[in-house]
Amino acid sequence: MPKPGRRKDDLEEGLLSGARKLPRSFVTKRTRWWKMLGALVIVVLCGILVSTEGRASAFTPITPVFPIPESEQLNWGQYSPYFPLAKYRAPPEGCVIDQVNILQRHGARFPTSGATAGIVAALAKLQAVPSYEDPALQFLKTFKYDLGTNDLVPYGAEQSFDAGQLAFTRYSKLISEDNVPFVRADSSERVRVSAVNWTAGFVAANGNRFIPDPVLVLSSSGNDTLEDTCPNAPPADPQDDAWINTFAPPITAKLNAGAPGANLTNIDVYSLISLCPFETVAKQVKSDFCTLFESFPQAFPGFAYVGDLDKFYGAAYGNPLGRVQGVGWVNELLARLTDAPVRDHTQTNRTLDGDPRTFPLRRTLYADFSHDNQIASILAALGLFRQPRPLDPARPDPRRTFRASALVPFSGRVAVERLRCAAERRVRVLVQDVLQPLEFCGGDAHGMCTLDAFVESQAYARHDGEGDFERCFANRTVEA
């Protein structure tokens, strides 16, 4: 086990780096954030350490609550912040959890560099017009775009810290000095830092008694089950664009009428709508772009459906090479659940997975940190959220269960729990705390199926994607 002092440095580095690369206009806020969070960590840790008999005090979230109804935040698609979509259900009487595998997305972030380019281009068109005919656009006269790119925002750091606190609170009976969480992360900085933030929250919640091993970082330049690995997988652009060009035209027309000469396109409108969630999570106040687009009833439901299509056709069931990208992680999950070596010939790193120091078995809590696309692939590889028919790029089905906000929100999480019920081992899966039915392995009224049935149901993964992984690299050189 690493020395607590060394881990404390790592924890603080992770927490504070969630607020890095904020633009100059945020310098004051950034400084406040560093001081506030540094003080907060000290207060939280000290408060726990002096609690009665050294026991951890109650879990107190530090993530702020936005003054925006959760039903509206769910229309932000994959940019929705995490919140539980159901009340956590304890195991039924006679069953005890003896292992949990957590798969979590990184916390809230700034737009990616690609999304930033679209946002900046759309804003430039709007702000270049000499005058606005629509009073709702007047705020643009003084608006300055000042978001960073790619990195976590402070809110995202707080999300992961809270997730770590919750993990210890919920699964504390699984933890001991000899059995601490094993944590892995993709090498993307926002993912790695989210894992460290989670660890900080976990340590804070347990009073600095149980300190996880240092985060194992999987390099995305090689075999990595926490990053999508299929260069031949087609993008979801055709489906995304088809829907944007279906729902956005009335909005585009009205904005162009209110800003003569802007000549916005439907894609520009999508980029502008995205400023609502991005600014809100970055500045922790409701963005003016939320208010602007609330006057268009179809704006946010339409925006959310773009995210649904993007994950369905880009990473999941709608992509012929979507599910296979989750196969490696599923096979690692099966190894952990069965306490047996990994059997996989897809994107697992066989050097790491073959070493008990970097892929230990018989741990009680595992936490892996990844991206939204990869988690969507893993959910599909498992057989979760399968739809009766493909999502229609022209007409959303209101009954669909495949929704990006419900599957992969910022800091969204999947928990695969192994339980012992009398002499039988069982499995259940929760996604944002919603218990999944597991009909593919005979799930009962409690959402559980036997471990044997669950393993048997994962034939696609156990058979290495049934040839799909090789199609990912047809006419390419596979990196060892």
Image (spheres, rainbow, N blue to C red):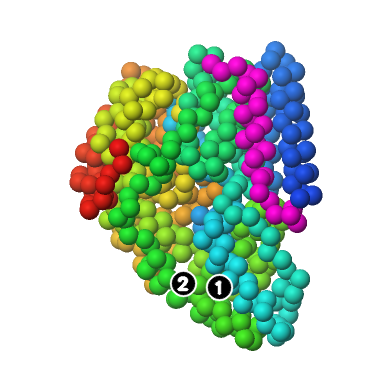
The image quarter containing residue 121 is bottom right
The image quarter containing residue 334 is top left
Q: Specify the label residue 244 is tagged with.
A: 2
Q: Viewer-proximal residue, 284 or 15?
A: 15
Q: Specify the label residue 305 is tagged with.
A: none
Q: Position of residue 437 (x, y in %)?
A: 37, 42
Kind of residue sitting beneath label 1:
Val
Horizontal arrangement in the rendering, residue 396 relative to residue 248 (left or right): left
Label 1 close to label 2 by CB (< 8 Å)? yes
In the rendered view, tell whether residue 97 sits above or below residue 461. Answer: above
Magenta-drawn stretch contains 24 = yes
Per the image, the residue denoted by label 1 is 269
- The structure residue drawn at horizontal position 75% and vertical position 24%, both measured from the top left corner, is 47
Q: Position of residue 477 (x, y in %)?
A: 26, 47
Element assignment for label 1:
helix
Mark 2: give few (<14), some (14-19) or many (20+) Cα within 10 Å. many
- The structure residue drawn at horizontal position 21% and vertical position 39%, both measured from the top left corner, is 463
Image: magenta residue range: 1-26
